[in-house]
Image (cartoon, rainbow, N blue to C red):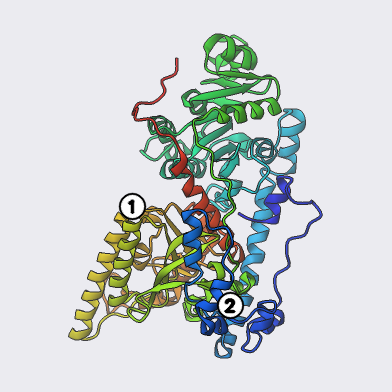
Amino acid sequence: MWNAVALRSLGRLSPNAASPPLPRLQTLKNRVLEGKSRDLHGGKQPAHVLQDQGLERTRDVLPCRLGSNKAKYRRWAKTYPVLDGRVLSVYWHVFEENLRNSEAVIKRYSELLERVSKGGGENAILHHTQRNKKLFVRERLKLLLDDESFLELSPLAGLNMPYGDVPAAGCLTGIGKICGVWCVFMANDATVKGGTIYPIGVKKQLRAQEIAMQNRLLSVYLVDSGGAFLPLQSELFPDKSHGGRVFYNEAIMSAMRIPQVAVVCGSCVAGGAYVPTMAEETVIIDKIGTLFLAGPPLVKAATGEYVSPEDLGGAKLHSEVSGCSDHFASSEKEAYECVRNVISTLNYDPLPEEVIEHDSPLYSSEELLGLAPRDYRCTLPVKLILSRLMDGSRFQEFKANYGTTLVTGFGHVEGHLVGIVANNGELSHDASLKGSHFVQLCSQRSIPILFLQNTAPHTAEPTSISQAEAHSNRLKAQASMMAAVACAAVPKITIVIGGCYGSESYVMCGRSFSPNFLFLWPNARVALLDSRHFSTVPQAGDNDCTRDESELKHLKEKLEEESSAFYSSARLWDDGVILPQNTRKVIAQCLEILEQQKYQVISPCQYPVIRM
């Protein structure tokens, strides 16, 4: 996501720039132990001193510019209580264990990103760029997008699939700015399997379209596809969420007044040909862009006639004869300039250019590596994490002394107000009722909700009538919160900071509850239950049967492998893995993206643009 590999590939980071080194154990130890908080803040007063000084200090740091209502709200936000984010010495052994685990999983994460950044490999890239005279997909994005960092979605999708590696699922998707407007882009990478579409590639494109619809974001398609991979056609074609859904979504998005622009920058064969022909405006590139349902080899096989790709479906044919393309471009550079011009014609009110004033957290984001739990037993108080994410480490807590295994309240991330719902232990009856209440408050006030998920891996079974009654009451309270989360009509962002286990993950807005964005930390685990608790699960059949130890061991290993963050991200169960220290930046950008729809001019018309 935000990484040196991606930025270098886009030309926005020097090729010689090294990735920032992971913080060493002793360095962080010196910064977080009690008595070192003044060093941590670069000479500022530690948080507990700020709390003691109260409002007197906060009034001294108010910004001078208080003209807008937002500025006034930010002024009052500076009176929120300051969280004490010091890591007490009693927690240090846990902090060290978490830090060692974070260094190991981030090393693996960096290796996978490096692998994905090479697309289909060096030979495939040379064939694509030198023989076919086409730009590599990341170079295309560099020409298309504004000169700013973009948010790449699910870069690890397609790795270690049953049918082999499909780096980045054969297409890059993400959200970036074009002419100052946030857009979803879907760009085929023809160096991966020759642009052939695999099941995971269809799933990735559908998720990008879902994000575009949910957040009302303009969509840009860079089409360079050889069509479906026929040996897997049963997983690509027949079902509701297979390839045809992409075209259905294009029509629905057009009816929703979500603009769509396509560039034919390579081969567009079979089903892939419908993507540009259903977009509202299409650009085709001379000599390299072709568009047809069946290519020259099939024409030769069917009729015995040879026809060139240009004569069958080239740029001139579709610009001058068929009308399938609206704009003819003589080069790729000209094509992306044309797209930028098209986007500049949209009836979008300009986004406000004011810089939102905000304070940085009082505690270093690098310390989140020691707060990312290796497993549930290594979980530290979640307020330590919040103190490294919130502006000024300030947090207005809701029901602080009730249902304390769930932390709820309000804070700001780079000036954006959010409601926070964060696991701080097992989701009890009281915590669930509190969560239900708070989520409804956010919905009433139209405040986006940020879920920090670290759910308990296993719940002990009741052994008495009183325990069974308490268990039932807890389930009812969780159902109440589940309904509140499902029906809350506000944007939701979920970050899995630890475990994503069982039914509690639904309550905390897991994938099934359609958050606008869902990201994982590299240490996260996603499974029905933790593999360490697998032996406690009742087995099918005769209870007196002796368990097959080798089978149980195999199942535990399988569960351990399938619960890793990288396994999850490869299958698009999330929108990508992000580094803990980049979490605040990613959340802030998501919140900025969500705000764009407030400035759109939406026509009351409810039918799509029908092409020729």
The reply to whether dot 2 and dot 1 touch (C-beta < 8 Å) is no
**Left or right, 238 with reference to 196:** left
**Left or right, 381 with reference to 353:** left
Instruction: Work out whether 530 lies above or below 171.
Output: below
> Which quadrant, please, contains the C terminus?
top left
Tell which tag, 2 or 1, sits nearer the viewer: 1
Q: Residue at x 57, y 56 (%)?
A: 356
Q: Amino acid at mark 1?
A: Ala
| Rendering coords of residue 183 (x, y %) | 54, 40
| Rendering coords of residue 19 (x, y %) | 73, 61
Crowding near the residue tagged with mark 1, few <14, some 14–19, many ≥20 C-alpha atoms within 10 Å: some
| Rendering coords of residue 527 (x, y %) | 43, 65
Q: Nearer the viewer, residue 588 or 359?
A: 359
**Left or right, 2 with reference to 271:** right
Of labels 2 and 1, earlier in sequence is 2
Instruction: Work out whether 569 lies above or below 230.
Output: below
> Which quadrant, please, contains the N terminus?
bottom right
**Left or right, 550 with reference to 339:** left
Task: Look at the numbered disc 2 and give the secondary structure of its residue.
Answer: helix
Q: Which residue is mark 2?
A: 98
Q: Which mark is residue 489?
A: 1
Instruction: Work out whether 555 lies above or below 322.
Output: below
Q: Amino acid at mark 2?
A: Asn
| Rendering coords of residue 82 (x, y %) | 51, 76
Instruction: Work out whether 284 lies above or below 57.
Output: above
Q: Which mark is residue 53?
A: none
Residue 384 visible here: yes
Q: Residue at x 35, y 82 (%)?
A: 401
| Residue 530 position by quadrant | bottom left
Task: Look at the numbered disc 1 and give the secondary structure of its residue.
Answer: loop
| Residue 313 position by quadrant | top right
| Residue 144 position by quadrant | top right
